[in-house]
Amino acid sequence: MNDEQLYKASFDELSNTLLNVSKNNALLTAQAKFYLEAYNNLQEEHKKLIEEKEELRKEYNSLLDENNQLKEDLRKLEGEPDPHTTEENK
């Protein structure tokens, strides 16, 4: 193999390598964009779930307060002594 043939073979090999690198780069870029978008979507869903959890916690606390008030009203209607002011609890 003379120098010209060696140069051409090396050049062809280098061209093929660069083409493969370019294809791999495009594939990796596409994968990165896909996973970044999926991550961002999950982050958004996570934020919504946290907001929903906070709203449910507020609703639960409100219902718990209402339940306690209803128990207190029922106790008063039934004429039971206030458990917070009886002698046994002091």
Image: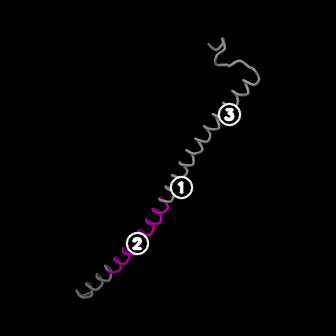
Q: Amino acid at mark 2?
A: Asn
User: Which SS class for mark 2?
Assistant: helix
**Of the two numbered discs 2 and 1 in the rendering, the one whose residue sits closer to the viewer:** 1
Q: Is residue 16 above or below residue 68?
A: below
Q: Residues within 10 Å of mark 3 (few under 14, many from 20)?
A: few
- Residue at the image position 40 percent from the left and 73 percent from the top: 26
On the picture, is 34 further left or further right than 7?
right
**Of the two numbered discs 1 and 3 in the rendering, the one whose residue sits closer to the viewer:** 3
Q: Is residue 90 above or below residue 53?
A: above
Q: Main secondary structure of the magenta part?
A: helix
Q: Amino acid at mark 3?
A: Asn
On the picture, is 90 further left or further right than 38?
right
- Residue at the image position 30 percent from the left and 84 percent from the top: 9
Instruction: Answer whether labels 2 and 1 touch (C-beta < 8 Å).
Output: no
Q: Which residue is mark 3?
A: 67
Q: Which residue is mark 2?
A: 24
Percent position (x, y) of residue 90?
A: 61, 13
Magenta span:
15-39
